[in-house]
Every structure is written in structure tokens, then in C-alpha cells.
Image (cartoon, rainbow, N blue to C red):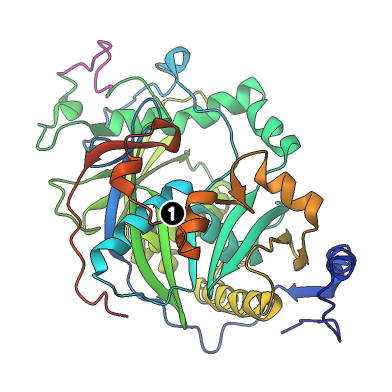
């Protein structure tokens, strides 16, 4: 597996610090992309457990108040519209607190069952892991903890990285806005809305045809699913853009919205096909069956739209020069999880590991020392990157009550609580 381990494990503090500084002790190389995956692992179809919303004030609510419904955008829509009114959520560390709140709440509906879960993570992190063998530029880092056999992932964002993400050049900031603007044109707050966008006969709140409302990236509707990669049972949470038609309590009519530059030639086509790799896994991991893409001019005006069925996307690139292969990604993901389990096996519950992804090379792992862990905690009430309330719940010292915590805004939840229905087949 390309894994090198030290001959002896020194459990002393000095040994841990020394081991943390030798990053090359734990290394896993990316697969050879010219060799197809001979026996890709099975991936279980995602099954939804529950949903939750974030309000404009970033309060987490166990309801569907942030759910949006798909409508067709107007032809030629101006994606620059509303830019000056954009409420942009500040860049922050990619905490998993909201997902842990949802998982903790769901476990209470299992009536004493204690399913063996191998991994809990946001969808975006797992997408970056699976697609890493094809990444050509990005270098990024992941924090990992393992408690009672369950691994927890959090993308590590240094203060420098956060500043870089916050201080975008005006041109790049505007381009990032185009995607959110497209979402506003493509969604409505109510189901069964007529299709005025097609005829251009109806105006949104601002008087602009088809506009669904000013962009506020604090507001999100999230789905939590269970799935399985190889032998690893996984809980994944992620934002869902909208649903087509009425929401039936499952992922069957989820829609992912994307924008891309109009394709004007072979080079543009090749670039778009590379983008399809992340489009595919972002939807595949949450069980989203449809991706609706808006193609735009460089100036931000919408030209055409196209629907892609998620399961059919790999066929669009298969056999082309330099094409990506989802089986390579799944096999790599399964191998990576095995590498991690072997690397951190036997370590303390409070240990935090730092995984570094190096494009075209592979990953390295190191155990953080006390200074590194304090940086991860960021001065917050945490054990590693896990919120203390969750740590205490796992340790059995505190029985966490999501409904009681819903009264506390600082924890990002609301008193609005919905009903959880345990999906069939949950007994794993």
C-alpha cells in the first residue's frame, strides 16, 4: 500500500512529538491513472436519514425552512444581478458541529441500536478525497480523529488559507457569485410554482424577471445520508440546492445547480469534462440524481442550460484521452480509508492527525503535537476539533439533548424540531 510505519510505537509525550515531526513516517502514493481499477469496491446507494436548515442568522433548525424548489431560469439571465446585495457568509474553519448535532439527534430514534459507523464527514471533504488522484494543482490538509472505531474528518484551514479565501480579487469574487445568482434564478420558496421564467412574464422581488431573491449564503438546506464504501459505513452531510416538484422525504428529486463557461471549442469541452468529475461525485455521494448546468458568457449572461443525469455522467467521458474513471476514485478512497485505519490504530481518543494531500504524489500523515492540537481547537471549547458536548456524549458523561440545545443560539440550533423517520434497512 506504499505505507511505511515506525518499528516501535513510543507512547511517551516526547515520542509522540518526535513522531509528529517526521511526516514521512506515514505515506500513501496515488494510484497509477493508466491502470484501471481491477476490482473497485462496492458503493451503497445513499439513504437519507434526516434534513436540517440554516437560517439567515445561521441558526441550525431541524426543519425544511430553507428548502427551495426548482424552476426554469429565464433565457439570457444576467448573473451579475444582485451582486451588491449579496450577504456573504464569512470564511471559517470547516467545522462538523452541525452534522454531529444531526447525527446525535438521529441516534436517539434508533431505540438503543448502536450502528458501527466507520466515518462521519461533510460531502465536500469526501469529494476532495475521492477526486485527489486527478487533482493537478491543489495541495490541502485534513484533520482526522478516531473514537471507538469511528473516524471524523475536518478540512484543515490555516489562518493564512482563510485570509486567502476571504480576500479574493474582485474578478474572482464576482465569478464565485455567478453560481449563487444562478441558484436564485433557478429556485422558488414554494412548490408547484408556475413556469413564468420561460415566458418572461413574471418578475421576482426585485422586479427582475425570474429573480428568486437576493443571495444570502448563510441560508442552507442540508441532507444527511448513510452509505457504504467497501466495508466502511459512512454518514455524509451536505447542502442540497433544490428539489424538482414536491419534496417526498427522500433524495429522488434532488437537483444540484452548477454554472460553467459556454463551450466554444475542443479546449473548452475538455475543461468542462474535467469539471464533471467533481460535479459527479458531489451529487453521487448524496444520492442527487440530477445536475442542472447553466452555461454563461464571460460577462455573466446565461446562454443555455442542460440537464445531466448523475449516473450517466461517467459515460460522457469514457474512452476519451485523459478521461477520469470513477472506479479509480472509489478504489483509491477505499485504499485511503484502510491506510488511515492502519496508521491511527491504537492511538489515543484525543489524538488529532494531519493528512496532507500533495497533487500528483500522494498523502502523508502525522500525529499533531500539543501546539498543533491547540491550533486546531482555535481557542474554542473543543477536544481536538470535536465540540466538547459531543466528546462528553461519546464518553458517556453527558446525555446530549438536541431539543434542549436548540434553545441556545450559540450552538447554532433552533427550537423548531421535526419528526425523524428511520429509513428501512437501517439495521446495519
Q: x and y percent of residue 329 in the render? A: 55, 71
Q: x and y percent of residue 325 in the render? A: 53, 72
Q: How many marks?
A: 1
The image quadrant of residue 241 is top left
- Is residue 210 highlighted in magenta? yes
Identify which residue, 267 or 31, lies in the foreground: 31
Q: Which residue sits at x=67%, y=38%?
A: 379
Does 362 sit left or right of 179 as displayed? right
Q: Is residue 362 depicted above or below 297 in this figure?
A: below
Residues in magenta? 202-211
- Quadrant of the snapshot with the C terminus: bottom left
- Quadrant of the snapshot with the N terminus: bottom right
SS at badge 1: helix
Q: Is residue 168 visible?
A: no
Residue, disc 1: 100
Determine crowd level at label 1: few under 14, some 14-19, many 20+ residues with C-alpha closer than 10 A.
some
Q: Which residue sits at x=18%, y=30%?
A: 198
Does 235 sit left or right of 366 as displayed? left
Q: x and y percent of residue 181 in the render? A: 39, 27
Q: Is residue 85 depicted above or below 284 in this figure?
A: above
Does 86 sit left or right of 91 as displayed? left
What predominant SS class does the magenta segment belong to? loop
- Is residue 297 highlighted in magenta? no
The image quadrant of residue 284 is bottom left
Q: Is residue 267 visible?
A: yes
Q: Is residue 48 depicted above or below 199 in this figure?
A: below
Q: x and y percent of residue 263 in the render? A: 49, 43
Amino acid at each position: 500500500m506504499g505505507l511505511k510505519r515506525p518499528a516501535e510505537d513510543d507512547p511517551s509525550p516526547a515520542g509522540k512529538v518526535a513522531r509528529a515531526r517526521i511526516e514521512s513516517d506515514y505515506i500513501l502514493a496515488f494510484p497509477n491513472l493508466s491502470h484501471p481499477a481491477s476490482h473497485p469496491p462496492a458503493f451503497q446507494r445513499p439513504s437519507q436519514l434526516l434534513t436540517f436548515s440554516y437560517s439567515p442568522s445561521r441558526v441550525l433548525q431541524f426543519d425544511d425552512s430553507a428548502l427551495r424548489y426548482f424552476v426554469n431560469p429565464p433565457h439570457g439571465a444576467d448573473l451579475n444581478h444582485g451582486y451588491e446585495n449579496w450577504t456573504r457568509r464569512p470564511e471559517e474553519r470547516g467545522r462538523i458541529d452541525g452534522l454531529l448535532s444531526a447525527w446525535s439527534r438521529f441516534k436517539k430514534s434508533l431505540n438503543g441500536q448502536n450502528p458501527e459507523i466507520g466515518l462521519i464527514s461533510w460531502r465536500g471533504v469526501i469529494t476532495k478525497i475521492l477526486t485527489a488522484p486527478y487533482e493537478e494543482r491543489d495541495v490541502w490538509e485534513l484533520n482526522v480523529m478516531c473514537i471507538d472505531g469511528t473516524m471524523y474528518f475536518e478540512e484543515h484551514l490555516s489562518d493564512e488559507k482563510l485570509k486567502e479565501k476571504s480576500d479574493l480579487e474582485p474578478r474572482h469574487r464576482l465569478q464565485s457569485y455567478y453560481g449563487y445568482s444562478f441558484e436564485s434564478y433557478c429556485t422558488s420558496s414554494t412548490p408547484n410554482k408556475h413556469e413564468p421564467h420561460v415566458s418572461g412574464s413574471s418578475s421576482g422581488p426585485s422586479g427582475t424577471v425570474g429573480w428568486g431573491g437576493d443571495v444570502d449564503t448563510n441560508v442552507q438546506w442540508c441532507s444527511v445520508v448513510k452509505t457504504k464504501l467497501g466495508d466502511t459505513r459512512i454518514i455524509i452531510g451536505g447542502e442540497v440546492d433544490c428539489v424538482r416538484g414536491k419534496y417526498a422525504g427522500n433524495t429522488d428529486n434532488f437537483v444540484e445547480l452548477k454554472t460553467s463557461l459556454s463551450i466554444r471549442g475542443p479546449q473548452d469541452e475538455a475543461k468542462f469534462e474535467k469539471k464533471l468529475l467533481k460535479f459527479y461525485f458531489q451529487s453521487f455521494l448524496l444520492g442527487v440524481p440530477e445536475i442542472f448546468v447553466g452555461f454563461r458568457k464571460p460577462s455573466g449572461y446565461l446562454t443555455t442550460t442542460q440537464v445531466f443525469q448523475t449516473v450517466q455522467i461517467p459515460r460522457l467521458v469514457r474512452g476519451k484521452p485523459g478521461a477520469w474513471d470513477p472506479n479509480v476514485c472509489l478504489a483509491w478512497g477505499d485504499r485511503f480509508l484502510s491506510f488511515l485505519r492502519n496508521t491511527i490504530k491504537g492511538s489515543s481518543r484525543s489524538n488529532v492527525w494531519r493528512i496532507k494531500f500533495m497533487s500528483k504524489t500522494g498523502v502523508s500523515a502525522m500525529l499533531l503535537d500539543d501546539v498543533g492540537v491547540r491550533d486546531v481547537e482555535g481557542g474554542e471549547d473543543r477536544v481536538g476539533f470535536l465540540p466538547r458536548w459531543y466528546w462528553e456524549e461519546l464518553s458517556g458523561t453527558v446525555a446530549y439533548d438536541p431539543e434542549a440545545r436548540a434553545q441556545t443560539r450559540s450552538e447554532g440550533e433552533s427550537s423548531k424540531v421535526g419528526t425523524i423517520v428511520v429509513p428501512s434497512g437501517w439495521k446495519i
